Image (cartoon, helix red, strand yellow):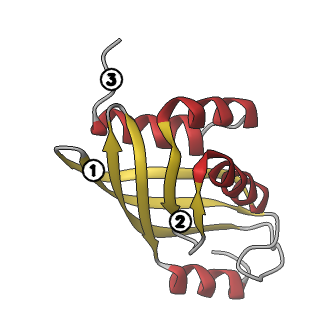
Amino acid sequence: MVPLTPRELVIHFYRDVWNAPQRDARTAAIERLIEEDFVFRGSLGSERRGRGDFAAYVDQVHAALADYRCDILELVCEGSRAFARMHFSGAHVGELLGYPPCGRRVGWDGAALFGCRVGRIAELWVLGDLDGLRAQLAKGGR
């Protein structure tokens, strides 16, 4: 089987890990797409290492944001690296960044830099507009 390219990995990562509604599907995608020693820094500021720690972060975000989505706005790839401009959104149904749930939709933009290794994602650094997100959370959503 031919390894996935960085472009394909990023597309599958967001579609199969973040945008999948079922936890089992997300877990299987994590096993398939990312390295065991994965290094991650998320748009919400959390840093994680390894598949298990990352999977716990994914569960935490999905618990706080129902119908959570990651939409790729732009994707640029060169060699083993990929850069994606993103939009993240969901309904605020659980505590997030210290704010109690309001039930309304929130969204924020971000930028993700991927490092890939032989058909898997090895590292990911995501920066998100946390000031904009906090402003929405303080107002009770959009």
Q: Position of residue 28 (x, y in %)?
A: 64, 29
Q: x, y (%) of residue 127?
A: 43, 72
Which amino acid type is marked by label 3? Answer: Pro
Label disc, if present, on residue 141 of the rendered structure: none
Pointer 1 local density, CA inside 10 Å: few below 14, some 14–19, many at least 20: many
Measuring 25% from the left and 50% from the top, which residue is drawn there? 81
Q: Which element carries disc 2, helix, strand or loop?
A: loop
Q: Is residue 21 above or below residue 74?
A: above
Q: Which residue is mark 1?
A: 82
Q: Amino acid at mark 2?
A: Gly
The Cα–Cα distance between marks 2 and 1, rounded to whole angstroms, is 16 Å
| Residue type of the residue flagged with mark 1 | Ala
Nearest the eye: 60 or 30: 30
Give whichever of discs 2 and 3 has the lower sequence position: 3
Single out the mark in the foreground, 2 or 3. Answer: 3
Q: Secondary structure at mark 3?
A: loop
Tell me, yes or no, whether the two marked residues, 3 and 1, touch with CB atoms within 8 Å.
no
Left or right, 89 with respect to 62, comes to left
Expressed as whole percent of the image width and height from the top left, the position of residue 92 reads 74, 66
Q: Would you name the residue on which mark 3 appears? A: 3
Q: Which residue is mark 2?
A: 42
Camera-side residue of 21 and 13: 13
Q: Residue at x 59, y 51 (%)?
A: 50
